[in-house]
Amino acid sequence: MPESKIELKIGAIEFSATGDDAWVAAQLDKLLSSAKSLVDLSPPPAQEKGIHGNHQPMGQDPDIAQKPLASFLKDKNATTAQVTKFLATAVWLEAKGKSRLTTADVTSALKDANQSRLGNPADCLNQNVKKGFCEKDGKQFYVTQEGKESL
């Protein structure tokens, strides 16, 4: 007797059946007749999460990327407070397309833009991580959407 197999997924509910053709067809008919109610019972799809929970990299932003760093820092009132200056510079770099950053990237960008240097960039990063504005990824980090919104 030939054997059939079916695998079906409706929302988060998965179904599979293996058996003779008539039995599998009958199971499929039962499943299809109640598909609407299964979809209603199925939990909503999980939100995409970053590697560290709900934090996700903010991504490129052409509105930010077109501004010179000095202007962006001034617009965000990030010229004096070290932690805010670090965050704003990281946001500016990510807006230009860098998906992962190091503290050296931030200090180099400030130096290249003729901005005053940070006293302790590693501490600035750690303080932003504590606030949920940055997330470490190995030896690198990224700015979260919360970090961008905080500016």
Image: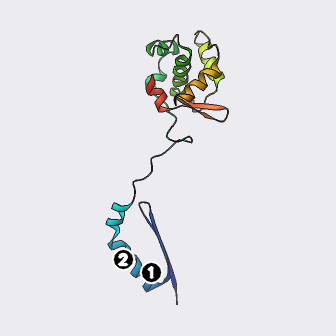
SS at badge 2: helix
Q: Residue at horizontal 56%, vertical 19%?
A: 86
Secondary structure state at the residue bearing disc 1: helix
Which residue bears the numbered disc 1? 24
Is 110 located above or below residue 39 in the figure? above
Q: Earlier in the sequence, mark 1 or mark 2?
A: 1
Residue 48 vertical placement versus 139 (above, below): below
Other-residue count near label 2 (Cα within 10 Å), few / some / many at <14 / 14–19 / ≥20? few
Q: Amino acid at mark 2?
A: Lys
**Which residue is most to the bottom?**
1
Which percent across, then down, holds residue 7?
48, 71
Residue depicted at 57% across the width and 24% down the height? 127
Is the C terminus in the top left, top right, bottom left or bottom right quadrant? top left
Whether residue 36 sits left or right of residue 102 in the image: it is left
Label 2 belongs to which residue? 30
Q: Is residue 34 above or below residue 78?
A: below
The amino acid at mark 1 is: Val
Residue 34: which quarter of the image? bottom left
Q: Is residue 25 left or right of residue 84?
A: left
Q: Position of residue 64 (x, y in %)?
A: 46, 22
Instruction: Calculate the distance from the C-alpha at mark 1 to the C-alpha at mark 2.
Output: 10 Å
Residue 101 x, y percent position in the rendering: 61, 28
Residue 94 or residue 142, whichever sits in front: 142
Dot in front, 1 or 2: 2
In percent of width and height, residue 14 lies at: 46, 66
Looking at the image, residue 75 sits to the left or right of residue 57; the answer is: left
At horizontal 52% and vertical 10% (from top left) the residue drawn is 80
Above or below, comparing residue 56 to residue 86 in the picture: below
